[in-house]
Amino acid sequence: MTAKIIDGKAFAARVRGLVKDHVTRLKEDHGITPGLAVVLVGEDPASQVYVRSKGRQTVEAGMKSVEHKLDADTSEEDLLKTVQQLNDDPEIHGILVQLPLPKHLNEDLVIGSIDPAKDVDGFHISNVGLLGTGQKSMVPCTPLGCLMMLRDHHGSISGMDAVVIGRSNIVGKPMAQLLLGDSCTVTIAHSRTKDLPDVVRRADIVVAAVGRPRMVPGDWIKPGATVIDVGINRLDAPEKGEGKTRLVGDVDYESCAAVAGAITPVPGGVGPMTIACLLANTVTACCRASG
Ligand code: GUN
């Protein structure tokens, strides 16, 4: 079998188009412009790239984009003040504090200070609790993007066996909640899971979110399964003709694509969907705030 490639880049472009149409209607019919604020502390190069990309796509969708770049040694008090100002700003509907934060800052405290209604990352414990109890919440962007691709590919995923590899608060745990919400039978596997290959072999849907390059080989995949690769790993030592670094996922693409029914590539799979979902969440937050 050769897997169908799930084109996240094209799907994300469609989502961004819908977001842009929605933003136009909000402006024309209600005089409201959704606003997204991104807070970046320090100069982590990967975070800078993400933040630039978020800002550009926010503007392209017709929304207001605000960036707060704070020094790496910013105090917790100053960061909390910045978040509070954004909480109080009626032109800002979504707030994202880029993670990871420098070590001296308490991430839980900072995330907890964001108004849950503006928490477009869905990381605030109120949103985590609402998602866990099946109530209306802000849903974390990467798992939301994965779910949208799964629904688009399968129609319904009800009753399917899903294995999520990785138990992070950002991806693994919310992904499992979303799959459960769509009536999958869900297993969360992690570094201490016994017989991981056998666990993965049972799955109709595999979501790999561990951050280890090419960890999942093709012989772990049930023939015809759908493989969603959340990993974005930068490998140095490029092969001839490639740039300085090469991006690879958490699954070994060639061997998995030979067995799977469908697979997301890296790059061009989950990655573009994450920012598209961030824009969609910002419009959702704006609509809820405006009644
Ligand atoms: N760092 C890596 N991914 C994310 C994300 O989805 N949101 C935030 N705030 N930081 C991140």
Image (cartoon, grey):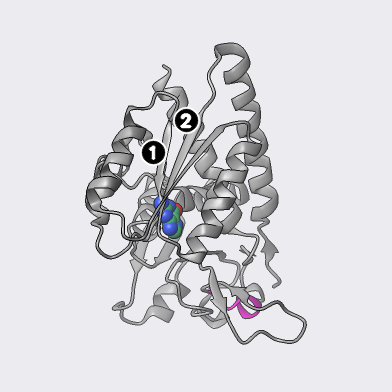
Q: Residue furthest top?
A: 29
Say which residue appears at 41% left-offset and 64% top-offset. 164
Which residue is tagged 2?
284
Q: Position of residue 8 (x, y in %)?
A: 64, 54
Q: Quadrant of the N terminus?
A: bottom right
Ligand 1 sits in quadrant: bottom left
Secondary structure state at the residue bearing disc 2 = helix
Say if 134 sits above or below 263 in the image.
above
Numbered range of the magenta stretch: 251-256
Q: Main secondary structure of the magenta part?
A: helix
Q: Residue furthest right?
A: 241
Q: Position of residue 238 (x, y in %)?
A: 66, 84
Task: Give the amino acid at mark 2.
Answer: Thr
Q: Which mark is residue 59?
A: none
Say which residue appears at 65% left-offset and 60% top-offset. 268
Task: Give the amino acid at mark 1.
Answer: Met
Which residue is tagged 1?
138
Binning the other alpha carbons within 10 Å of mark 1 as few (below 14), some (14 to 19) or many (20 upward) gives: many
Instruction: Report whether residue 181 is seen.
Output: yes
- Compared across the picture, whether 33 is left or right of 12 comes to left
Please identify the quarter of the rendering in which residue 210 is found: bottom left
